[in-house]
Image (tube, rainbow, N blue to C red):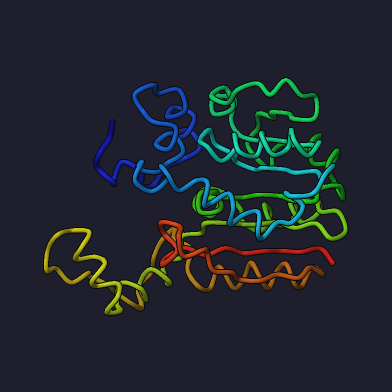
């Protein structure tokens, strides 16, 4: 199994397709994370998502997981949807979805596609989704695609009162602030078992990295389209809460 954290940098959609079928990788590594960042944490992640998405705890909801992956999280969603009679659509590549078990329920559906290149599904779900989950995904959309096209099409799916959680967003500005702080320097030194000071550069172009300006622009675009939108912190018991945050969008 890969131990070099650089293995997980600059991943593409095609990389994830190949990783999904690589039997030498754990389920966490297949979705782009070292085991240390997800093993034993995904139950906490699921609970944090549930707190921000009340429809996940309600019967008969329509739940749409965009880029669901194949780790513990989609399996927790499947279990919860089965108990609550929810309609659950799990969207990812065929390769990734093939790693998930069959639920046996007609309400739980795997949809292989590269979102949002799925016009029939988008038309079917338009105005009907109570909870859309985009977790640890938007950074790849930003690097490879059109983040505002992705957002606009997803906004159209929400039912009245429906929510989108764009979660676990790596914000390079937030990361720099953290690792420039006393707490961040101490964390870095404990992690590296050294006395090194993190090399942090401000006022620098960060190609293909989401920063504060992108976070704010997503919120502003959703609000301008008539939706409520908020920046939210992650729960403190999540592994990267000091450098990642969430965006919650609500259809009034």
Residue occupying image coordinates x 22% and y 70%: 199
Residue at the extreme left of the image, as rendered: 195
Which quadrant of the rendered structure holds the C terminus?
A: bottom right
Q: Is residue 192 above or below residue 181?
A: above
* 237 sits left or right of 6 in the view: right
Residue 20 coordinates in the image, percent (x, y): 47, 28
Residue occupying image coordinates x 46% and y 38%: 31
Residue 243 coordinates in the image, percent (x, y): 42, 65
How many marks do you count on the picture? 0
Q: Is residue 237 above or below residue 110?
A: below
Residue 94 coordinates in the image, percent (x, y): 59, 25
* 228 sits left or right of 11 in the view: right
Residue 110 coordinates in the image, percent (x, y): 69, 28
Q: Is residue 101 above or below residue 151?
A: above
Residue occupying image coordinates x 35% and y 72%: 176
* Quadrant in the rendering for residue 228: bottom right
């Amino acid at each position: 199994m890969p131990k070099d954290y650089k293995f997980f940098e600059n991943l593409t959609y095609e990389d994830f397709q190949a990783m999904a079928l690589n039997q030498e990788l754990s389920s966490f590594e297949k979705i782009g994370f070292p085991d240390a960042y997800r093993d034993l944490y995904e139950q906490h992640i699921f609970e944090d998502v549930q707190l921000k998405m009340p429809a996940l705890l309600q019967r008969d909801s329509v739940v749409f997981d965009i880029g669901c992956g194949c780790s513990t999280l989609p399996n927790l969603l499947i279990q919860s949807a089965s108990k609550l009679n929810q309609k659950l659509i799990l969207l990812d590549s065929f390769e990734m979805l093939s790693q998930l078990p069959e639920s046996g329920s007609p309400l739980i559906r795997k949809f292989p596609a590269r979102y949002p290149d799925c016009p029939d599904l988008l038309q079917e779900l338009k105005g009907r989704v109570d909870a859309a989950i985009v977790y640890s995904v938007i950074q790849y959309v930003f690097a490879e695609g059109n983040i505002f096209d992705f957002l606009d099409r997803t906004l159209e799916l929400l039912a009245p009162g429906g929510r989108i959680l764009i979660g676990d967003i790596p914000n390079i500005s937030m990361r720099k602030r953290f690792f420039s702080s006393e707490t961040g320097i101490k964390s870095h030194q404990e992690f590296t078992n050294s006395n090194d000071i993190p090399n942090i550069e401000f006022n620098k172009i960060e190609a293909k990295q989401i920063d504060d300006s992108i976070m704010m622009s997503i919120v502003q675009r959703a609000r301008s389209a008539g939706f409520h939108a908020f920046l939210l912190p992650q729960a403190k018991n999540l592994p990267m809460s000091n450098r990642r945050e969430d965006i919650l969008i609500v259809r009034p």
